Image: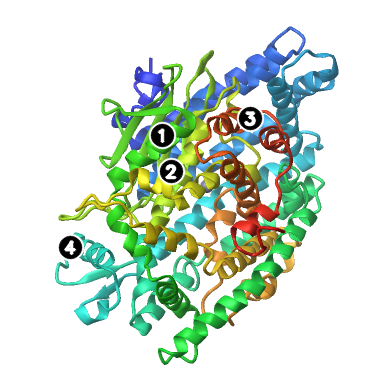
């Protein structure tokens, strides 16, 4: 029996992680031991004297890395949730160990021969749909990893994978460190002009935490940066914070230029070795969209549509700003004047909603919403250990059957070392674990405005959207059915994964949903009906502008991954060329690419388009609810059964058709954004 807690089976309910007992120094020995165990499991598959079968080879392989996967998910989740220098250093150390192990597996000829033998016999096997997909996916993952290559190419590929594994953590760490290096200290109260009280209080708290109670501190963390760039009426200060934000990881000690070029070159080399023209071709083979041409056609069509709207948006803002004496509108003015214009046109501010959205009420309302749709019950599980005092654990049960379906953790507030942004993650997927089908363990992690001494955490409407979004992912994980963890929950093709999350955001523009939980934290009053109407009217405000920006970033991602990058040395010039059809200003700041963590440190390379792709799906899926009723039981049930429960066990196009009775109608998105009329 080992005394390393990470290597022990948890005695807790649903085998929940023992966060209270995990020590940083346990991760490395646990990883090494778990890799040894996985190697032994794989050796046993190879040494099996029986002929290869689906059970003794494919299922045995699927379950061979259970321990390693628990240790790894825990480690990477701790890294993003705590981000200590120790964990960061470990990430750089553990990355290559993992990469090497993966290469050993994927390039193991004897193992692949057994898998291939089952795959080649697939026509004669009696397999369920889920099993067929597992067989196909297992075989493909080996082929895509180089299993069909000769020895020299295999060795090259191994080197590339190892090198790549260290670069992503370096890239994201540079972005984080570069952001943290910037501090905007305000000493003079007059320099807070325009800022909403919540932003001022937050900045005061930051300053107090840093031992400077007489000042205010703003940072590049979104809850600090976002309100500042939107509301500060001091133009030079807006410029200062905008400039720091747009020069993140560029021209400073944390410059990502070299790392970025290494990443794109290695990706390209890998694609070429595997027989693909570019990294995008390699990636998109395993996407709903399938080819770079399909994606580029999708993006350029939308870019041109959005550009028409964006130019109108820009004209309107310029005209409005000129009334304020600004005749040379700059990028750091756009957020400010567009917010002022929105306030004028719709007579409300995003901040007006904060009093109605105290986090505890919002959370109750969120759970009630998911309960109404899918019949779920969320019960705080205060007996389960968590990774930080801000975190709460929940037991999730199905109300109708009374069955326990999974464990959910929620981690809501920013803190030093925690990665900015919001995400959902899994500690364990639904499916086989130690020979039994176990329920999932998932988490949602956000960076919401913190409560202060006198005020609870009050969210703005965007933050409530974020919560519904992440809970959409979480329910995808929690409602999963199925036996094989690699096929359940959010393990779907990337351009399908944002459907369940984005779909949920639609309800937050509906009075029925908002009225079910939003109430003024002091008076208990509901949101006035006119304010909800204004929110709905304002929803498409700047939709051209924002759509164009998103298309620009998506095209930039595709450009990085559809060219031979060996000739690129000037990142700025490359980016300008890639984004020229989507840029409405000349360049003032550093390149976006060097802090574009989604594509250089996350899983979104040649995949940023998938947000918009999924929007087409979610707009069309929501129309099903608009047609049948917002909480129509049959529609919700069909969606739950055909999409959420199925995970990646069937191609997404098939799942979608089973839910909707047809393919998604792209005009549903354009209708929602007001870019085409309802009749078109
Ligand atoms: Zn998402």
Q: Which mark is residue 90?
A: 2
Image location (x, y in percent) of residue 594: 55, 65
Q: Nearer the N terminus, badge 3 or badge 4? A: 4
Q: Quadrant of the N terminus?
A: top left
Ligand 1 lies under 8 Å from the Cβ of mark 4: no
Res. 188 visible in picture: no
* Tally of marks: 4
- Indicate whether 474 appears above or below 518: above
Secondary element under disc 3, as helix, strand or loop, is helix
Callout 4 environment at 10 Å: few (<14), some (14 to 19), or many (20+)? some
Secondary element under disc 4, as helix, strand or loop, is helix
Relative to 496, 367 lies left or right = left
Q: Nearer the N terminus, badge 2 or badge 3? A: 2
Callout in the foreground (2, 3): 3
> Mark 1 and mark 3: span between their CA atoms?
38 Å
Q: Residue at x 48, y 30 (%)?
A: 374
Callout 2 environment at 10 Å: few (<14), some (14 to 19), or many (20+)? some
Q: Which mark is residue 642?
A: 3
Say if mark 2 contacts mark 1, CB within 8 Å: yes
Q: Nearer the N terminus, badge 2 or badge 1? A: 1
Q: Nearer the N terminus, badge 1 or badge 3? A: 1
> Mark 4 and mark 2: span between their CA atoms?
32 Å
């Amino acid at each position: 029996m080992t005394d390393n807690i990470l290597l022990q089976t948890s005695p807790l309910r649903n085998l929940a992680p023992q966060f209270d007992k995990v020590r940083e120094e346990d991760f490395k020995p646990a990883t090494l031991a778990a890799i040894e165990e996985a190697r032994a499991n794989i050796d046993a598959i190879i040494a099996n004297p029986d002929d290869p079968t689906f059970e003794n080879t494919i299922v045995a392989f699927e379950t061979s890395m259970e321990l390693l996967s628990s240790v790894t998910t825990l480690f990477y989740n701790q890294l993003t949730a705590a981000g200590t220098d120790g964990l960061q250093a470990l990430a750089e150390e553990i990355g290559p160990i993992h990469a090497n192990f993966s290469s050993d597996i994927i390039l193991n000829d004897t193992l692949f021969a057994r898998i291939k033998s089952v795959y080649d016999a697939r026509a004669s096997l009696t397999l369920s749909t889920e099993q067929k997909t597992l067989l196909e996916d297992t075989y493909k993952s080996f082929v895509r990893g180089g299993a069909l290559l000769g020895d020299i190419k295999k060795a090259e590929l191994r080197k590339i994978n190892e090198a790549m594994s260290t670069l992503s953590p370096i890239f994201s760490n540079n972005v984080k460190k570069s952001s943290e290096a910037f501090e905007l200290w305000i000493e003079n109260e007059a320099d807070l002009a325009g800022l909403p009280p919540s932003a001022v209080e937050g900045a005061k708290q930051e300053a107090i935490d840093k031992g400077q109670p007489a000042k205010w501190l703003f940072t590049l963390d979104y809850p600090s940066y976002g309100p500042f760039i939107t509301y500060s009426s001091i133009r030079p200060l807006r410029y200062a914070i905008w400039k720091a934000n747009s020069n993140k990881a560029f021209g400073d000690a944390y410059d990502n230029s070299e790392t970025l070029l290494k990443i794109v070159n290695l990706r390209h080399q890998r694609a070429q070795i595997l027989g693909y023209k570019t990294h995008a071709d390699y990636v998109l083979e395993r996407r709903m969209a399938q080819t770079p041409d399909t994606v580029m056609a999708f993006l350029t069509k939308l870019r041109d549509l959005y550009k028409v709207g964006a130019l109108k948006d820009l004209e309107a803002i310029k005209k409005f700003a000129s009334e304020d004496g600004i005749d040379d509108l700059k990028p750091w003015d756009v957020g400010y004047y567009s917010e002022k214009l929105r306030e004028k046109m719709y007579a409300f501010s995003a901040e007006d909603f904060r009093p109605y959205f105290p986090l505890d009420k919002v959370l109750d309302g969120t759970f009630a919403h998911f309960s109404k749709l899918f019949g779920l019950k969320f019960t705080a599980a205060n007996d389960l250990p968590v990774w930080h005092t801000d975190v709460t654990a929940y037991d999730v049960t199905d109300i109708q059957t009374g069955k326990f379906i999974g464990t959910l953790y929620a981690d809501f507030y920013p803190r030093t070392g925690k990665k900015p942004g919001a995400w959902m993650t899994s500690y364990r997927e639904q499916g086989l674990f130690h020979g039994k089908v176990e329920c999932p363990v998932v988490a949602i992690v956000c960076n919401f405005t913190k409560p202060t001494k006198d005020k609870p955490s009050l969210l703005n409407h965007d933050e409530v959207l974020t919560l519904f979004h992440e809970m959409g992912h979480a329910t995808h994980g929690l409602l999963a059915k199925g036996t094989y963890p690699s096929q359940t929950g959010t393990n779907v093709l990337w351009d399908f994964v944002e459907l369940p999350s984005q779909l949920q955001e639609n309800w937050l523009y509906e009075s029925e949903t908002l009225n079910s939980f939003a109430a003024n934290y002091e008076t208990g009053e509901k949101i006035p009906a006119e304010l909800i109407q204004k929110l709905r009217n304002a929803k498409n405000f700047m939709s051209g502008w924002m759509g164009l920006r998103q298309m620009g970033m998506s095209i930039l991602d595709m450009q990085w991954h559809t060219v031979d990058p060996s000739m690129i040395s000037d990142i700025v010039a490359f980016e300008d060329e890639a984004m020229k059809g989507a840029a409405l200003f000349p360049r003032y700041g550093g390149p976006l690419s060097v802090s574009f963590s989604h594509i250089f440190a996350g899983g979104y390379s040649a995949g940023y388009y998938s947000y918009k792709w999924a929007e087409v799906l979610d707009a069309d899926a929501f129309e099903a609810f608009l047609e049948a009723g917002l909480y129509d039981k049959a529609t919700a049930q069909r969606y739950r059964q055909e999409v959420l429960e199925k995970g990646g066990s069937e191609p997404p196009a098939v799942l979608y058709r089973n839910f909707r009775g047809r393919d998604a109608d792209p005009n549903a998105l354009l209708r929602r954004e007001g870019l085409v009329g309802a009749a078109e």
